[in-house]
Image (cartoon, rainbow, N blue to C red):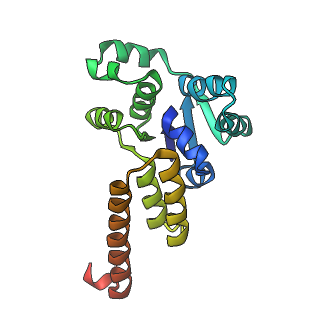
Amino acid sequence: MTLKIDSCSLIYVTKAGLIPLLQEMYGKLIITEKVFEETVTQGTKRGYPDAFLIWKYVIEGTITVIEATKEIYMKKISASNRLYKLGQGEWETIIEAKNESCTALIDDLLARKIAKEESVTAIPIDIVLIEALIRHKLTENEFYSLLNKVSKVKALTGARIAEIIYLVRLILKYLLRKKFEGPQNE
């Protein structure tokens, strides 16, 4: 599996310490050169610690940087004006994810809406955490601990945190019920 990550989401997951989890879940973590420029080149000039950490992940090969193909620029030119409302890193991530039929990690709501219109699966970090819990990559305690970290770096509202916790409790309740009922009732 492959996960394309936009700039904002990359900064959030790096600050929250989620890169190893993402690699375990998706295997290939890919960013475009523009996302690298926005996060590492500009971030290191400003002395942001997460920029140096992203750079380390790139050097180690945990994150792969790709050049956006000329085809992407042609699609941008011919695309509707929706893409012009996004930053270059966001639209490159969306179009690259579309080209490779893979998931994009995007936290910006407008970018996710546009991704959906482009038939791209784009998910925010909180959904990745829920997926990790369901796939048994995280314990319930680890999930809540990471949700707390994400809420600080992403500035999740209390209402959004409450929605996530409610959803997780419903999912866990359902999974527990299914576990005890067994496959005969599916």
Please give the name of the residue rendered at 54% of the width and 55% of the height, measured from the top-left corner.
149
Q: Where is residue 151 in the image (x, y as percent from the top left)?
A: 47, 52
Determine the residue located farthest toward the bottom in the rendered image: 180
The quarter of the image holding the C terminus is bottom left
Please give the name of the residue rendered at 43% of the width and 40% of the height, measured from the top-left corner.
104
Nearest to the observer: residue 104 or residue 111:
111
Q: From the viewer's perspective, is residue 128 above or below residue 54? A: below
Please give the name of the residue rendered at 47% of the width and 26% of the height, measured from the top-left corner.
89
Q: In this view, does 182 lie to the left or right of 58?
A: left
Q: Is residue 156 left or right of residue 10?
A: left
Q: From the viewer's perspective, is residue 161 above or below residue 67? A: below
| Total numbered badges shown on the rendered structure | 0
Q: Position of residue 101 (x, y in %)?
A: 40, 38
Task: Name the image quarter holding residue 48.
Answer: top right
Please give the name of the residue rendered at 43% of the width and 53% of the height, measured from the top-left corner.
126
Q: Using the rendered image of the protein, determine whether residue 137 is visible from the camera's viewpoint.
A: no
Q: From the viewer's perspective, is residue 135 above or below residue 34? A: below
Q: Position of residue 174 (x, y in %)?
A: 32, 76
Nearest to the observer: residue 145 or residue 76:
145
